[in-house]
Amino acid sequence: MKKSESIKGVRIFDDLIDAELEEIAKICHEKKFWKGDMVIKQGEKDASINILVDGALHTEVEIPGFKDIVPVHTLEPKEIFGELAFLGGIPRSATVRCLSTAKVLVLERAKFNKLGEKNPNIERIVMRNLAVILSERLRNTTMELRDAVSKLPSRVVSRKAKSILSDLSEWIGSIECIARI
């Protein structure tokens, strides 16, 4: 299978023509992982976005003050992950582990920037699609947070709400670079 076939149908590349997909595929490199492998680690710095081609991955987050690791999302083929680091070069916000053997395509920001200089249309479309995906994820996270807080007893909410909102505000500040795009 050609690499461009592996990225066809990935939402971040919607509206690109086959020739543009081929250009992106040329700058991606493939990595294979086995069940239990760590694909990315929370806190590490990197500037790449990843595309799950085959297999299943699981996203988990370590939260200071919590004993257990919090499961976040199970990724399926054609999904992207690592987009915040790709955009802002900020540390990884979650750990991603393999639930099965997996094949991942890695798109490094530096290579994408060079491609964008040669073909600004590719960069414009990918960044627009990425903005849509991120806004959907932020909306979903906000709704999940609202639902989780609404289930807490009011005495806990009053004590914890200030702390949660402070942490959320700090997190939003750390992704301000995305808003400048």
Image (cartoon, rainbow, N blue to C red):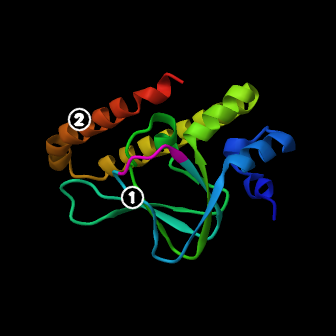
Q: Is residue 85 above or below residue 117?
A: below
Which-is-in-front pick, marks 1 and 2? Answer: 1
In the rendered structure, which amino acid carries the disc numbered 2? Ser
The residue tagged 1 is: 41
User: Main structural element of the magenta stretch: helix, strand or loop?
Assistant: loop
The residue tagged 2 is: 166
In the rendered structure, which amino acid carries the disc numbered 1? Lys
State the image coordinates of residue 46 (x, y, percent, origin top left): 44, 46
> Hey, which residue is sitting farthest right in the picture?
18
Q: Residue at x 17, y 49 (%)?
A: 156
Specify whether residue 123 is in view: no
46, 75: nearer the viewer: 46
Mark 1, residues whose alpha carbon is within 10 Å: few (<14), some, or many (≥20)?
Answer: some
State the image coordinates of residue 122 (x, y, percent, origin top left): 73, 33
Q: Secondary structure at mark 2?
A: helix
Q: Report whether 47 appears left or right of 115.
A: left
Read off the magenta span: 44-48
Q: Residue at x 73, y 50 (%)?
A: 25
Q: Residue at x 61, y 48 (%)?
A: 107
State the image coordinates of residue 48 (x, y, percent, origin top left): 53, 46
Q: Report whether 81 appears left or right of 93.
A: right
Is residue 46 highlighted in magenta? yes
Q: Report whether 57 appears left or right of 63.
A: right
